[in-house]
Every structure is written in structure tokens, then in C-alpha cells.
Amino acid sequence: MPDQIFLLPGEMDWRREPCVLATLLGSCVAVCLHDPGKGWGGMNHFMVPNRGQGPSLEAGKCGDSAIAALLRLAEMSGSRRGDLVAQVFGGGAVVGHLASVGQAGLGNIGDRNVAAARAALVAAGVRIQRHDTGGTQGRRVRFDTASGNATVAAIASTEQRAVREERLKEFAARRIRVLVVDDSATIRRIIRSVIEASDDLEVADEAADPFEARERILSQAPDVLTLDLIMPNLDGLSFLRRLMRFKPIPTVVVSTIAQQGSTMRAKVLEAGAVAVIDKEDLRLYQGAAGTSDLLLPALRSAATTAVKARP
């Protein structure tokens, strides 16, 4: 088995031999670099965007210097910047032990860390292959330096666990109420049939566009939404951003333009979506079984997730 190394804030590592690098992230960010041609890779873990905002911190805990140092390690080992691909993780708006610098007067430190990572990688000419950032949960990251594969698992905060337990008790006494938002009447009908065939969920209402959705949210107070992205009057991403700013509701995006690894998927997750499902994966026109296996667990999980207003 390959070596396994756990990185603390401010630490980094680059490996030419197979290794699994792991870390825990809250508002901090980890950048994973991989040289696909050689099978080499590395990771860092930083706390603040740059030295100017953390002058008393070691260089490895500041984004600008930490990313520059990781790039130097890659180049010193024999990799070229143009051959590297990057993955960016973390930057959550979390509380508790995973947000150690959250009181440093830096506003939303997670967002700033993510922005710093992107800016540094773009300036270095390194393509960002994937990012899993933002949200309100911490992350446990494991990065395989040989394959370049990274696995990310959410870490619920104490507050989130309390909310989940409270909502599970509530939903034990009643069904989870879902608002289905999609401009296609056919898609709404299919999703409705799948939800209403379950024992623990029901459709609170339907909406064909964001303006209808707004009215249904106010009148029906659903527990969770399914949200399409391509809709008339206002696109789903813009609506999601407004929703998470003024009336946060757990939202599962269901769209053909938010495939795994796409820029759009990253945008809706950053905007506050709890989960994203590619409509193609639902196999909506091939029977209810495949749709329910994917959609219903996502809705149940989303309904018990604590979401907070975003600036």
C-alpha cells in the first residue's frame, strides 16, 4: 500500500512515489497538484489568502506563498508547470474548530482563500481541473498522488448535527415537503410521481419558473427544492443566489448543464446548492426505479441540511 501522510495547516508535500496525502479543511484551502504524465503529485493546506493578511503566520499558512512553494517543489522534482493540473478544496463558511481564523476580521475567509488559490493558479498557467469549495461544511480530503484522484467527504459541524437531529425527529412525524421547480411540465410530472410513490416525501407544489417558485415558497414553506437551471424569466443559478441570500432553503439542482466536473456544477455548489444531479443520470424517461434511487436519497439528505444566508 502507498504511504499515507496527514497534512496540518501550513504543511505541504510533493511525492514522486505513490502516496496518499490527507487533510481536514474548514475555511482553509488545500491545493492538489498532479503531473498526469509522470504520476507525481502534491498538496498544501493554507489558512489565509496572502502574507499581507497573515503577517505573523508562517509562509506555508498563507495562500500566495504556499502555492508558490508547492509549484517550486513540483518544478524541482522535474515537472513542468504546463503539465500540471490542479484541484482546489475547502473554503467553507464553517464555525468551530475547523474555522480557526474565522474571527480574524477578514470577512468570509473561506471565499477569500478560494479566490486566492484560483488567482495564483491562473497566474502560474496551471489548469484547474476540479474544485469543491464553499458551503457550510468542513471537508475531509484524500489525494492519491499517483493517479491524481481525490476523494472528498463532508464533515458536519456540531450545529449542523443538531439541526439534522431536530429535523429527523420532525420528519418522523410528517412527510418531507418538496417544491419542484422546472419549466417542463413533463419533467415536473415525472419527478412528482417518483416523490409521491415514496413513504416519506410529498410534493408541496410545482413551479415553472423562478417567479412562480418565489410565490410557492412563500405560500407553501417547503422543506427542500428541486431546481432546474435553464428556465424562462430568470435562470436557475441567479435564482439560487438570490434565494440563498434572502431565504435559504435546502436545494437540489437537477439539470442537464451541471454535469460532474463542469464549471456550472461548481458554480451552483458555490451558490449554496446542497446537491447537484445531472438529469441524464436520473434516466427520467426509463422508468421510476433509476430516478428514485438517485433523487430520493438526495432530497432526504438535503432536507436535513442546515443552510445559511450568503452575502
Image (cartoon, rainbow, N blue to C red):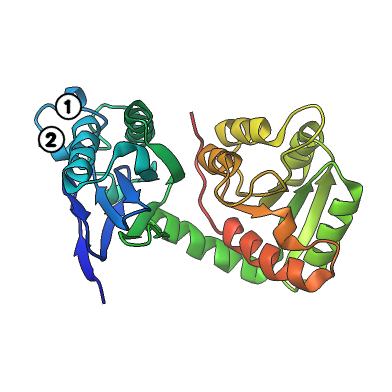
Answer whether residue 6 is visible to the viewer in this image.
yes
Alpha carbon of mark 2 to alpha carbon of mark 1: how far? 7 Å
Q: Nearer the viewer, residue 156 or 169?
A: 156
The answer to whether the residue labelled 2 contacts the one labelled 1, judged by CB atoms less than 8 Å apart, is yes
Residue 209 pos. (x, y %): 81, 36
Q: Nearer the viewer, residue 97 or 112?
A: 112
Q: Nearer the viewer, residue 304 or 189?
A: 189
> Of label 2 and label 1, which has the lower sequence position?
1
Q: Secondary structure at mark 2?
A: helix
In the picture, the disc for residue 59 is 2
- Tell whether 139 sits left or right of 175: left
In the picture, the disc for residue 51 is 1
Answer whether residue 97 is visible to the viewer in this image.
no
Q: Secondary structure at mark 1?
A: helix
Please state which amino acid type lies under the numbered disc 1: Arg
Decide: is 16 above or below 50: below
Q: Locate residue 268: give its quadrant.
A: top right
Please state which amino acid type lies under the numbered disc 2: Ala
The quarter in which the N terminus is drawn is bottom left
- At 38% across and 29% down in the image, what residue appears? 122
Q: Locate residue 38: give its quadrant.
A: bottom left
